[in-house]
Image (spheres, rainbow, N blue to C red):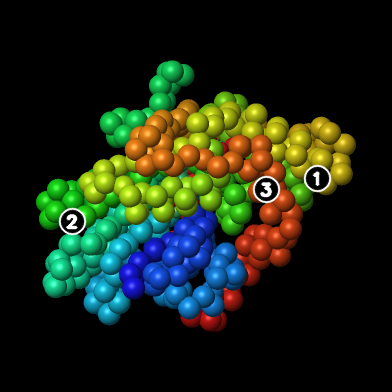
Amino acid sequence: MKTIVITGGAGFIGSHVVRLFVTKYPEYRIVNLDKLTYAGNLANLTDIEHAPNYTFVKGDITDAAFLDAMFAEIQPDGVIHLAAESHVDRSITDPMSFVMTNVVGTVNLLNAAKNCWKDSPTGFEGKRFYHVSTDEVYGSLHNPEEFFLETTSYDPQSPYSASKAASDHFVRAYGNTYKMPVVLSNCSNNYGPNHFPEKLIPLMIHNIQTNKPLPVYGKGENVRDWLYVVDHARAIDTIFHNGTLGETYNIGGFNEWKNIDLVHLLCSIMDRKLGREEGTSAKLITYVTDRAGHDLRYAIDASKIMNELGWKPSLQFEEGLEKTVDWFLANQEWLDNVTSGNYQKYYEDMY
Ligand code: NAD
Ligand code: DAU
């Protein structure tokens, strides 16, 4: 039996990765390591929490001693590292927590895996450290013809993307220096069930539902490439199993949207779902002060993973957005708990 540690498994993307691995690989033991910050929510995993091959461990990746002890005890064969501080706006007000979790936490995890694996009878043989990263490390595109390739130079522009870029460099440096078996991916914007409502799509859905203003930063002209979260989880599965060690894979949906066009599309879907007259929700759109240092456009060229590993997105955007809206409308309790912070109080008593 293989033991795989998935960090950040109680978060948005991590919960979909944990679900996919627990259900698709009953022969693996999946250990979900998560600190349960404001963004970690075990309600994302209630359907699989009693699976015999699933274990949850509450822990902080900034705690090196804890990680060393945990790795010595469970002797994992693989690590899929998603734990991070993930919200750009929070990184602008509190950069140090991003340095601690995203940079120091990643190096702690690399050290824990390296020390555990190099002392094992088979060394690095059959082991794999997979680092999940973002397209934001490449910076902002200004030429509409340009896409981010795996060879694009790093040019991070926010404290969040700088911290993710630093973590990517450390992972590659451990691959080069210690010959650790590492693999990386850089993905575009995800959307779907369990998305924390500080991010654009779930925030807009929640505000439309509750008739609050829809804050569009600047002129709404910034462009993002959106991918359904389950397709990202499928890509992570593909890369973890078939990606070449030492390589990086860009993941994206070839699906670029200007923020304002996306918000209008969401308004129109929500009007239909809530039985409101078309145009009602759009009246809530409010242009607000732009994000400091706001990157203009991200666009991933995902040809490498598509051509070399045979992955491709399974959903069209409109279909994925409909599914997402349906999920939020059907999971009002999840949204209420998250927006009120109730789930965090629950974990404070529980763990
Ligand atoms: P998220 O904020 O929803 O979840 C992060 C998870 O990490 C939470 O469960 C949180 O409790 C946990 N965590 C945070 N600090 C921790 C610590 N010190 N120790 C242990 N656990 C900790 O994030 P997400 O959107 O699911 O992103 C997951 C990963 O994917 C991140 O590395 C992010 O950079 C990357 N990524 C995200 C996107 C996106 O669109 N959301 C796109 C590309 C890459
Ligand atoms: O590109 C991948 C990245 O996508 C991930 O690495 C990050 O973890 C993830 O948070 C996301 O970053 P963004 O900054 O692109 O996502 P966010 O949802 O915060 O914002 C999307 C766009 O919408 C961005 O141009 C800012 C804008 N926006 C956002 C919010 C929250 C608004 O106009 N209004 C808002 O209220």
N-term mark: 3 or 2: 2
Q: Residue at x 14, y 48 (%)?
A: 176
Q: For the residue with label 1, is its CB less than 8 Å from the closest atom of ligand 2?
A: no
Q: Quadrant of residue 262?
A: top right
Foreground mark, 3 or 1, reads 3
Task: Say left or right for 314 vs 35.
Answer: right
Which amino acid type is marked by label 3?
A: Lys
- For label 1, the SS is helix
- Circle 1 is placed at which residue position? 273
Instruction: Assess whether mark 1 and mark 3 are in contact (beta carbons under 8 angstroms).
Output: no
On the image, which quarter does residue 126 sit in?
A: bottom left
Q: Earlier in the sequence, mark 3 or mark 1?
A: 1
The residue that mark 2 highlights is: 180
Place of residue 269 in the rendered image (x, y in percent of width and height, measured from the top left): 75, 39
> Which corner quadrant holds the N terminus?
bottom left
166 relative position to 202: left or right: left
Disc number lying in front (1 or 2): 2
Q: Earlier in the sequence, mark 1 or mark 2?
A: 2
* Label 3 sits on residue: 323
Cβ of mark 2 under 8 A from ligand 1: no
The amino acid on which the numbered mark 2 sits, given as a three-letter code, is Met
Q: Where ligand 1 lies, by image quadrant?
A: bottom left
Q: Indicate the secondary structure of the residue bearing disc 2.
A: loop
> What is the CA distance from the residue labelled 1 to the residue labelled 2?
50 Å
The residue shown at (16%, 72%) is 120
